[in-house]
Image (cartoon, grey):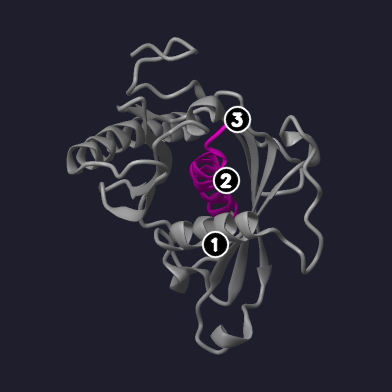
Amino acid sequence: MTRADGRQPHELRPVTFQRGFSKHAPGSVLASYGDTRVLCTAMYTDGVPPFLQGRGQGWLTAEYSMLPSATKDRKSRDKPGKVDGRSVEIQRLIGRSLRGVVDMTKLTERTVWIDCDVLQADGGTRTASITGAWVALYDLFKHMEQKRVLRGWPLTSQLGAVSVGVVANEVLVDLAYAEDSKAGTDMNLVMTGEGQFIEVQGSAEGAPFSREHLDSMLQSGAAAISTLFKLQRDALGI
């Protein structure tokens, strides 16, 4: 199956990580998956939430939002106390995914703030947020390391994410919106550099999917994330 943009089923869209996009955040990356653009920033503040005070460890939290012009039809801005359910779900996913590869004891009592703002949406905004946020987080930790405010290097692994799905009975990787909107099965995978899963989100939108399709989605998604890991390292020069 040849896709509308000419990609093969297993191919990612063009993916880039433009570092240093924002002047004031020590870690900032414009992550692009095709026409999806997400600004990921990483900053830190002293102190931790009350449930962690006195434990000598840090915390990481994430926020996610879409600009009104990110989609064809204007999206209303989230307001304090009235964040829509989708945004809450995605920011929780971003936070727990990143916490899975951070040793909080190395931060002392500091909170890392990850902000992912979708400038333009064409499918895969949550996966672009996670993968781009890891690059921003790396730059933040290098900044903190230079300031000598860490007990050691906090990152324990790379982190990447991609969408996979079944469209017209075929497994596709990194779905654009036009594909995602008609997918019979939709899945998001989050993996570490060691090939371990942090999150597998998948559901049938129409007919149930087979074990064969599940295995194929996992295999194709893992291969795509391996490519994302290389792109992250290339962007960081590591």
Considering only vertical position in the picture, is 217 above or below 5? Answer: below
Residue holding disc 2: 136
Q: Single out the residue that lies furthest toward the bottom.
A: 54
Which residue, given by chain and number where applicable, does mark 1 sit on?
92
Q: Is residue 230 left or right of residue 94?
A: left
Q: Position of residue 10 (x, y in %)?
A: 32, 23
The quadrant of the image that shows the C terminus is: top left
Total marks drawn? 3
Residue at image location 60% in from the left, 30% down from the top: 122
Do labels 2 and 3 touch, CB within 8 Å? no
Q: Nearer the viewer, mark 1 or mark 2?
A: 1
Q: Is residue 5 above or below residue 20?
A: above
Earlier residue among tags 2 and 3:
3
Kind of residue sitting beneath label 3: Asp
Residue drawn at the location 26% of the way across and 48% of the way down: 194
**Between discs 1 and 2, the one toward the N terminus:** 1
**Mark carried by residue 122:** 3
The magenta segment: 123-145
**Can I make out residue 63 in this image?**
no
Q: Which secondary structure dominates the residues rendered in magenta?
A: helix
Q: Nearer the viewer, residue 13 or 212?
A: 212
Amino acid at the residue labelled 1:
Arg
Q: CA distance from mark 3 to mark 1?
A: 21 Å
- CA gap, disc 1 and disc 2: 18 Å
Q: Residue 81 or 233: which is nearer the viewer?
A: 81
